[in-house]
Amino acid sequence: MPRRQRGPQRRPITVELRRGPLTESVHVVHAVVVDAAGDIQQAWGEPERLVHPRSAVKPLQALPLVETGAADAFGCSDEELALACSSHNGEPGHVESVEAWLARIGYSHEDLECGVEASRGPTSARNNCSGKHVGFLTVARHLGVDPAGYIRPDHPVQQLVTQALAETAGETIDPDRSGIDGCGIPIHPVPLRALALAASRFGSPGGYWTDERGAAVRRLANAMTVHPWLVAGTGRLPTDLMAAAGGDLVVKDGAEGVQFAALPGRGLGIAVKALDGHVPASEIVLGHVLAEVEGFDRDDVFGPRRRIENHAGTHVADLIVT
Amino acid sequence: MPRRQRGPQRRPITVELRRGPLTESVHVVHAVVVDAAGDIQQAWGEPERLVHPRSAVKPLQALPLVETGAADAFGCSDEELALACSSHNGEPGHVESVEAWLARIGYSHEDLECGVEASRGPTSARNNCSGKHVGFLTVARHLGVDPAGYIRPDHPVQQLVTQALAETAGETIDPDRSGIDGCGIPIHPVPLRALALAASRFGSPGGYWTDERGAAVRRLANAMTVHPWLVAGTGRLPTDLMAAAGGDLVVKDGAEGVQFAALPGRGLGIAVKALDGHVPASEIVLGHVLAEVEGFDRDDVFGPRRRIENHAGTHVADLIVT
C-alpha cells in the first residue's frame, strides 16, 4: 500500500482554445506527479479521481507477455514488445510487423478479437490495438490454453492482465466497476494517483518489485524508448516525445485524454486525464507538467501542438494553459 | 435591439460519458431557446456567453448570395442553395455538384480559397466549406468585383457576409474580437442568445424583416429542409434530423460543438455550445432541448448517438444528459 502523503495540490489545469482574442473552448485537465514510494509530488485537480486508463496502461498489460516467458519462448524482438505496448497508427510498417508476428505464432488476423476500425480498411491487423492483441495470443499459446475468447474477463490471459494492473497500481480491482474497452477487453478504473504510481515504478523499478518484474518492466520500457515509432506512429506525441527524450521518458497515451509518463532518471510517474476526454489538451498538459517538474521544455515537440492552423496553413488559434 | 427579458435559467447541461458504472468523461454544454421577439424562453448556462458560431451560421452567410440577386442571375437551384449553407462530407454527390456549379459560373476548384482538407484528397472542392465558397465566388462574379482574396475581411463579399450576421443576430460587430475560420474567412463572436435569435428569425421571418430578406431566409430554409443530405451528408445529425422533421426543423452544426436550430412552426430558435467543443455532446443536448421544448423526442435519431459501440460492435458506453 503506497503512502499517500500529499505535496502541493492545486486546481485542475485549464487549457483554452483561443481564436483571435476570444476563448472559444475550455478544457479542464487533472494531473498528478507521484514518486516511486507513492508520495504525491504535485497535483492539479483531483488525484483520487477514478479514471479508466484505457490504452495508457498497455505497457502494464504487456507484462504477462514477458513474465510468463511467452516472449522468450516465441523469440519476440524488442520491436514486437514495443508493438505489444502500442496504440499504433496502422501504417504499413506497423501492420506488416503485426502480421509477421501473428504468422510466427501460428495465427492470423482472423484470430484477433479487437475488431476492425472502419476507417482503416478490412483487417483487424490495422486496429490500433492489434499489437497488444498479438501479445495476448502469444501468452495464450504459451500457456497452452484455448485462445478463443481471450478478451473475456474470465479468460486466463485477461486474469493475468488484470492482476498486472492491480499490482503495479497498488489497487484492489472491483469487478463491479469494470467496463469494456474499444478493443473488447475488460478495463478497470484506478485513481489517477495510482496510475502515476504505476508509471513511476514502470520507469524506475529498483527496490519495488521482484527481480523478475523489475527485469520485465526494464525490458518493456527499453523496447518502447528504443522503438518509439512502433508505440504510436508518424506525428504522434508518444513517438515524438520519446524520440526527443532519448530514453529519459517513457510515454503512453490512452483514449479520452489520458496520458501515462515515466521519468526513469527522477523516479517519477505522471498521469493526466482531460475531464472532457480531449486528447490535444491532455498532451499540452503533459508538456506543461514536464516543463514544470523536469525542466523538460521541448518547444519543438509541444509548440506545433499548441498552434492550430486551418486548411490553408494559416495560424488561426492556439491551445493555451491558463 | 431585441428585448432581453429572461425566462427560466438553469445551470449548464452536463453530458457524461458512462462506461460501465463509471463516469469516464464530462462535457458542459450551454443552450438557449429564444423567440422571434428576442425573449429568452429557456436557458441552461450562460446565454450571454460570446461564442464563435463557426459553420453554424452558414445559412446566414448565404444570405448575400440570394439578396444580391446572384443566385437568380446564375440560375442557382435549391440544391445549390443547400450546398451554400452546408458543411458537407465531401461525398461524390457533394463534390460533383460543387464542381458543376463552379464550372457554370466560370471558375474551378483552383479559385476556391478554403484550402484542402488533408484527409479528403487533393482538391479543395472536397473541403466541407466548398459549397459556401462557391456561393461567395458567385456573389463576387455577380457584383463584378475581383474574386481573388474573397476571404479577406475587406473584400466586398465578406463585408456583406458580416453585415448579414450583424443584422440577423441583432449585434454590433467588433472587428477587434474577430478571428479566422478553418476555411479562412473572418468570423465574429456573438452571444449565444443572439445566435438563437438569428435562428428563430431564420425559421420564422414574418414581421421581422423586409420582404426581400423574408423571402431570402424562406428560400434558404426551404432549400435546406428539402435537401438535407446536401447540408451535411450520410450519417450526419443535420441531415438525419431535418429528414426526420420534414420541414419542421432547420438545423446547422458548427465546429467546436455549436448547434443552430430553428423551429418555424413555433417561432423559436435554439443555440447550443459545448464549452469543450465536443460535437457529440452538443448533438445530444440539442436532442434534449428539442424534447423538452417541442416534445420532439426522436429516439431513432438521437438513440444511436447516445449509444457508443466499440470496433467489434459491442455496446460499451453511453452519452447521458445528467
Image (spheres, coloured by chain):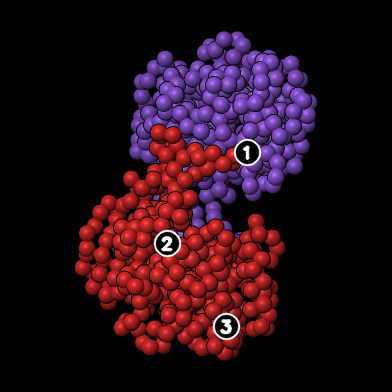
Chain colours: A purple, B red
Quarter holding the N terminus of chain A is: top left
**Separation of marks 3 and 1 at Cα, in angstroms:** 45 Å
Q: Where is residue B184 in the image (x, y as percent from the top left)?
A: 55, 67
Q: In which quarter of the image is residue A58?
A: top right
Residue at the image position 54 percent from the left and 55 percent from the top: A308
In this view, the mark in front (3 or 1): 1
Q: In which quarter of the image is residue B163?
A: bottom left
Along the viewing direction, whichever of B170 and B232 lies nearer the viewer = B232
Q: Name the residue under label 2.
A: B259
> Can residue A23 be seen here?
no
To the question of a shared chain for discs 2 and 3, the answer is yes
Q: Which chain carries label 3?
A: B
Q: Name the residue under label 3.
A: B76
Q: Mark 1 lies on which chain?
A: A
Q: Which amino acid does label 3 sit on?
A: Cys
Residue at the image position 77 percent from the left and 25 percent from the top: A106
In this view, the mark in front (2 or 1): 1
Q: What element carries label 3?
A: loop
To the question of a shared chain for discs 2 and 1, the answer is no
**Separation of marks 2 and 1 at Cα, in angstroms:** 32 Å
